Amino acid sequence: MLGRFFERHPFWSVVILLAAALLLWAILAPWSEGVEDVLGRKRIFLNALFSGITLGALYFLVASGFTLIFGLMRNVNLAHGSLYLVGGYLGFEISEATGWWILAFPVVFVIAAAMGVILQWAVFRRMEGEELRQVLVTIGLSIVLADIMLWIWGGQSYTVLTPDWLAGPADLPIIAGRDRAGDYTYLRFPAVRIAILLAAIALGVAMWLGLNRTRIGMIIRAGVDDRAMLAAAGVRIQIVFVGVFAFGAGLAGIAGIVGGTFQSLSPGEDTRYLLASLVVVIVGGMGSIPGAALGALIIGVAEQFGSVYAPTYSVVLTFLIMALVLAFRPQGLMGRSR
Amino acid sequence: MAVAETASGTTPAPAGRIPPRYWVTGALLLLMPAIANDFFLYQVFGWAFILGTIALSLQFLAGYGGMVSLLQMSVAALAGYVVAILGTSGTVALSLGWPWWVVIPIALAGACLFATAVGALAVRTEGIYMIMITLAIAAAFFYFTRQNYSIFNGYSGFPGVVPPPVLGLDWRQPVPFYYLTLGVALVCYLVVLYVARAPFGLALQGVRDNPRRMAALGFDVFWHRVLAQGFAAVIAGLGGILLVWQNGQISPGTAGLPAVFDILVVAIVGGLRHPVGPYIGALIYVLLRAFAPDVLQALGLSGERFKMVVGIGFLAVVWWSPDGVLGLWDRWRALRAAGRDPLTGRAGR
C-alpha cells in the first residue's frame, strides 16, 4: 500500500518524508541557541507535542466508537458525548468507592455498552435510514441526559484520581535541553499519560486487526459496504448492529474515565467531546478507523500547539484545518468518496 | 405549497381572499398591548417573536432547501456582536459608537457574508454531513468568541447594548418593543412566504426534491443553496440584533450549544412545513420556559429541572409527530376530512 502511494504521488511522498525527518530531528537532536531563538524553548515544544499526542489518543478513543457506529449503520449518535460524560462520572464513583482505578474500566465499559444496546434497540432500530429524526432524537436524549447528570452530580468539576503506580512523572530518553552545568536534561512527562497513549495505540491496532483479520471484522466490513446483501447472505444484521453499537458506546464510556483522569469532568464536557469527535471524523473521514486515528492526532496536536503558541486563536486553527479538509477533500483525509 | 394544498384535498383559496383565522390572529396580535401586561409583552411575546424569527431562517433552509443548518444561532449572534462592537455598549473601550443606520446594515451584511462563506463549504455535502459540519462550526464560533478578548471581549462579552432612540421613543419599553418585534417578525414572515413562491424559492424547492434533475434543467444547484444560506442569514441577523437589544447584552453563551439546539427545537416543534411553524414553536418554548419552573415547583420538584421538561417534550414531538405542531394540525384536518362524505360534504357516513 505504501509502495503504491509512492508510485502515485512521488512528489508528496518526498515532502512527507522530509517533514517526518525534520520532525524527528526536532524531537531527538538538542536544539542550538539559534534555533531556540526562533522557535522558543525546546522543552515547551516537546511538551506541546506530547500533550497533543496524548490528547489525540483521548480523541481517538471517543471518535473511533462514533465513526465505527456511523460507518456501519449510518446512525448519527449525537448522544455520544453524553455517553462519554456518563462513563466519566461512573468511573469517578467506582474508583472513589473501591479505590481501584483499573476496576472502573471494565465496569464502565459494560454499563456504557448496555446503554448503547438500549439506544440501538429502542431508538435507532425504529428509525433506520431517517437521519434527521435520529439526529433530533439523539439531541433530545442528550439534553435530557445532561440535565439528569447535572441533577445527580451538580455543577462542580471532578477529577478521577490517578493510582499510585501511575502517579508522578517519568523520564523519557529524549533530550529537552541543557541545565546550568551544560549537561543534557531529559523530558519528564506524566506516567499516566504515557500509559494512556500506549493503551490507545494498542487498542487502535487491535481494532484494526479485529476489523481486517477476523471473521467478525469481515462481517462488519461487508456491512459497511452493502448491508442489504449481507442480510440476504444470512447474517443476522440486527445483532451485528447491536454489538457494534455496544462496543462503540463502551469505548465512549472508557474515554470518559481517561478524560476524567488527565483533565476534568463537568457539565458541558459532553458537548465538547461530541464536537471533538465530529471534527475528528470530518477531518479523518467518516467511518474509517485509520482516518479517526489520523484525524485525532492532527486535531489533538493542533489544539495543543495552538494553545501554546497562539492562545486566543487555537480554536481557529482547528477550524481552519477542518475548513481546508472540507474545501479540498470533502470526504475526509482517509474517507472514500461515495 | 400550492401543490401540497391541492394534494391534501382542500380547495386553493383565490388570490386576495384571506381566511378569517388570519384576520383574528392579526387583530389579536395588534391589540395585544390592550389586554396583556408588560411581562407578557416583553418577556413572552417579544422573546417569542425574536426566537421565532431566528428559527424562521432555519425553517426556510430546512423546509424549502432541505438543508438543516445548525449555524443560524451563530449567525444571529454574529450580527448582535457587530451591533455591540460598532455601536454603543457598556464596554466603552471596545465599542466604536457609530450611528445605528450605519451599524445595522453592516451587521446584516456581515452575517450574510459569514453564512455565505460557511454555506459554500457546507453545501458541498448533504443531509447528515451538513448537520455535523454546521454544528462543528457553530461550536467553533462559540469557543472563539469566548477565547478572543481583542474583538469579542471574551467571557464577559458586551453589556449595556440598548436600541437607539429613534423617533424620540425608548424602544426598550414593553409596548414599543412589542410592536418592533412584531413588525420585524411579520415582515420576515411575509418575505419568506413571498420568496417561497417566487422563482428562486420554487427552484430551491426543486433542488431540495431532486438536485440532479434541477441541474439537468440548467439550474445552478450550488449557487441556489449558497444564496439560500445568505438570504436566511439576513433573517437570522435581524433576529440576532433584536435579541441583543432585548437582553441588553451579548456574550458567548448567546450562541452556546444549548442555544443552538434551542433554535432547532423551536423550529422542529413548530413544524418545518410552513413559515408560521417557528413562531408557534417559539411561543410554546417561551411559555414553557416562563411557567415550567412554577409548575414544577407546585408539583414538588425543583424548578431547575425545566430543561428536562423541554427535552422530554421535544423527544415526544419528534417521536410521535416529526412534522411538529403543524403536522398535528394537518393530521387533525385530514381526520375531519376523512370523516366526511367526499361527494356531499356531510359529516358521518
Image (cartoon, rainbow, N blue to C red):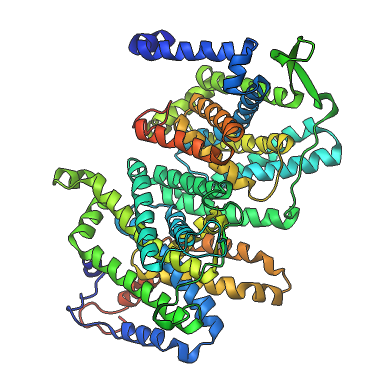
Rendered position, A310 above or below B110: above
Residue B348 in percent (x, y) is at 32, 82
Q: Nearer the viewer, residue B346 or A316?
A: A316
The residue at the point 61 percent across, 57 percent down is B156
Residue B145 in percent (x, y) is at 53, 50
Residue A77 in percent (x, y) is at 52, 44
Instruction: Point out the residue furthest to the left here.
Output: B217
Q: Is residue B324 visible?
A: no
Rendered position, B106 above or below A205: below
Q: Is A76 positioned to the left or the right of A232 in the image?
A: right
Instruction: Point out the residue furthest to the bottom here.
Output: B34
Q: Nearer the viewer, residue A316 or B45?
A: A316
Q: Is B232 positioned to the left or the right of B288 in the image?
A: left
Q: Is B14 positioned to the left or the right of B181 in the image?
A: left
Q: Is residue B194 visible?
A: yes
Q: Quadrant of residue B168?
A: bottom left
Residue B227 in percent (x, y) is at 28, 52
- Image quarter hosting the N terminus of chain B: bottom left
Rendered position, A35 above or below A107: above
Rendered position, B183 above or below A284: below
The residue at the point 55 percent across, 61 percent down is B92
